[in-house]
Amino acid sequence: MSAVIDLCFFRHNFSIAKRASLSSLLSFSELSCSESEDGKEACLFDFMDKNSVTEKELIFKIRELRQIKPREDWVSLTKSQILGQEPVAEIRFLHFPFLRFPLFKPVYAGLIVVFVVFGAFGFTESSLPGDLLYPVKKIVERSQAVFVSEKGRPQASFELANKRLEELTKIAETNQVKKIAPALEEYQASVAQVTKNLAKVTATTSDPVVIRELAERTQELEKNKEKLEQTYGIAGLEIKEGSNPMKVLVEWLINDLEKRTLTEEQSLLFETAKKNYEAGEFNKSLEKLLTF
Amino acid sequence: MVNYRKEFSKIYDKCIDKIYRFIFLKVNSQEIAQDLTSETFLKGWEAFRKSQNPGHNNQKIENPSAFLYQIARNLVIDHYREKGKAQVISAEYTPIIDPKQDLEEKSLLESDIGQIRLALNDLKEDYQNVIIWHYLDDLPISEVAKMLGRTEETTRVLLHRALKTLRNQMSRIQTS
């Protein structure tokens, strides 16, 4: 047997020799099918080729099992179930030894109620569009909005629109594909609300300082939106023309500046801003109008 | 929080196919494999979260993939122990995603896969694991040895024996 392995090493290469030495299936009797040295060698290599193909085939067949894959929808659903929800804050009061004392049992129950109520509110705060608790979050937001003065409403609606963008960022970060569509709807609705509130303010105010402040908030919202688009490549953030808050502000500023006396340089800039407005480039137009 | 959620999300994406396949080859049922795989990742995620919190004597998970395999192994063992089930091959094989369009080739391929699954299923646990990890998941011998708690040399011997037994099983299946 060793002579045969040596022969392999000499005539071919080390790997074949090693294979021959490792192959427990290889019995020497199978090799001695011919008496002559040449015949024996030929028989050996025939057998080894056959044997190595079998092993290769076996490994190939094992590797074919890589085709076993879980269903893609199940994979994404499971991922969102495990990672999608923000974890509930761990309530560690159970570790407080005084709460285990029987006298405190009613207190314990009361505390649980308090924790559950506040915990639920806390949990809704971190819920995302498409979550079960998200409608509760919306109700809480709406009830808070009732207490906001008419003057403060545009600012509050900007905050809500930015919140919707934050939710979209969280969704994109955790790759919760199914929540993107409802989150986009929520974002569009919040922007429409911003525009509605801005239209009310622009119809009643004549104070350019207020308008400028609101314009800055609008630009901030636009920047956040662009950042989200660039970082995560989310499509569908484009604001519909009818509900673009910039359009409302640009119209107000144009009307206001038309009543004022401008220098030659300012008039040129104003004309460009107007052209931008007519072309639907509200952001560019606003940038120019804010320099006055 | 967001960072280690993102980190675990990457681990999930990297390991989900492997863990699912590892469990599926042992339980031979899509539903059970899905259940045990989700449980594996849920336990993995809980442990991962705790490991990020140094205040609770939690050890850092050095090799998340090996850690998930360990959970999966325990869950499969628990599954058979709890249900008192023998490892029976289901006649109903789940559809296998096959990029090849040719139907004849596909049916041939499926029967090959069916044979290898049957043969693999008849092997003892260590033999199954060493074959799956080394040949299917391409883990190096050193890592397989660590996961099995053996030396590299004994792992090589184990792999050699596992392959030999698998080959015998295959010929038995083919002749029968």
Image (spheres, rainbow, N blue to C red):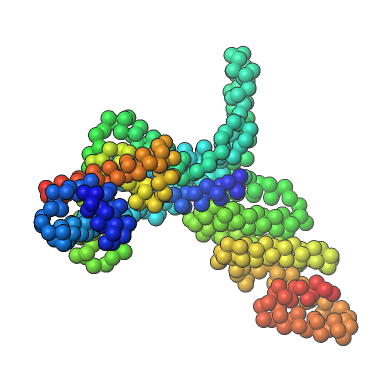
Point out residue A13 in the picture as x, y percentages from the top left corner: 31, 60
Residue A130, visible in the rendered structure = no
Judge whether A251 appears above or below A32 on screen.
below
Residue A60's place in the image compared with A229, above or below, is above
Q: For residue A270, say whether it is visible.
A: yes
Q: Quadrant of the C terminus of chain A?
A: bottom right
Q: Which of B15/A21 is in front?
A: A21
Residue A99 at x, y percent in the picture: 62, 19
State which quadrant residue A166 falls in. Answer: bottom right
Residue at 49 percent of width and 57 percent of height: A177
In percent of the image, x 69 and y 50: which residue is there? Answer: A145
Q: Residue B15 versus residue A191: which sits nearer the camera? A: B15
A40 to the left or right of A150: left
Instruction: Please report the residue visible at 85 percent of the width from the left and 81 percent of the height from the top.
Output: A266
Q: List x then y, in percent, for residue A71.
A: 36, 53
Q: Position of residue A174 (x, y in %)?
A: 54, 52
* A86 to the left or right of A278: left
Q: Residue at the spot x=51%, y=52% of the render?
A: B10
